[in-house]
Each structure stands twice: as C-alpha cells, then as structure tokens.
Amino acid sequence: MTNLTDWDDLMVNLGLEPSTPKRQPKRRPSAITQCGTAAGWDRHYRRNEPPCDACRKAKNEARTKARRASGVGPLKIAECGTASAAHRHWRRGEPICEPCRVARAAALRAQRAAKKEAS
C-alpha cells in the first residue's frame, strides 16, 4: 500500500490536484439546557429520566401554544347529564352520577331501537 505522499505525487503527475485532508467540522460547545424549558424536558426524555415539574409544565405550555397556533381549540369536557359524561365518569373511575346514568340509559335504548328497526 502506498503512503499519502506517493499518492499525492501520482495525482500531480496525472495533472490532478493533490488530495487534501478532510477538515472536521467544528463542534459547537455543548450547552446544557436549563430545567424549566421545553428543551430541558427533551433532555430528560433523551436520558430516560423522569422530567422535573418545571420541565413538565414548560413542555405542556409549549404543546398548548403549538396547538393553538395550528388552530386546534381547547378540549371540550362533556357536561353531566349526557351519555358522553357518563363515559367520562367511567373512564376516570368515578361513580356515575344520576343524571349521567339516566342519559346513558336513554342513549342505549335509542341505539337498540335504531338497530332493531334497521334489521
């Protein structure tokens, strides 16, 4: 195997430019991200650490801001007295209140009646 100077001499003899060593790009000094920012939350995530409360709050605010900028409105919570609210109670493991229980029963009766008419 030829060394680099022999290779460079060959390149010059062929009328080509000699090889130049590749320059390594300069590395940015690694800045440690601050806790209490969305970037701090990302750092916790990359390191498989549980995020601190300040980072969690900052990430939630950043997500909310991004959602609002894209036109997504705030989530609507179903009011009690509807079948959706009964499902919300069930999903959260809460006892289902009476107005929600009545609304759910009425919705199920209507669903069964519509299914019976369709068949």
Image (cartoon, helix red, strand yellow):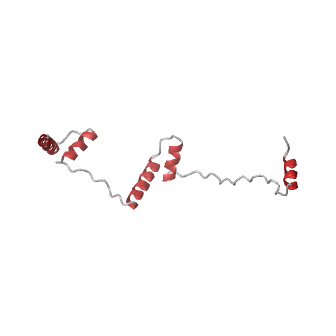
Residue at screen point 84% across, 53% down: 11
**In the rendered view, would you say 117 is above or below 31?**
above
In the figure, residue 118 lies in which quadrant? top left
Residue at screen point 54% across, 42% down: 47
In the figure, residue 14 lies in which quadrant? bottom right
Q: Give whichever of 55, 9 is nearer the camera.
A: 9
In the figure, residue 112 lies in which quadrant? top left
Q: Give whichever of 26, 45 is nearer the camera.
A: 26
Residue 56 position in % (x across, y down) = 44, 48
Q: Give whichever of 49, 113 is nearer the camera.
A: 113
Residue 49 position in % (x across, y down) = 50, 41
> Exactly how many numbered labels are in the figure?
0
Residue 79 position in % (x across, y down) = 21, 51
**In the rendered view, would you say 25 is above or below 90?**
below
Q: Give whichever of 106, 78 is nearer the camera.
A: 106
Left or right: residue 99 compared with residue 57: left
- Report the residue that reaches farthest toward the front: 14
Left or right: residue 99 compared with residue 70: left
Left or right: residue 22 compared with residue 96: right
Residue at screen point 72% across, 52% down: 24
From the image, which quarter does the N terminus lie in?
top right
Residue at screen point 36% across, 60% down: 71
From the image, which quarter does the C terminus lie in?
top left
Residue 84 position in % (x across, y down) = 22, 46
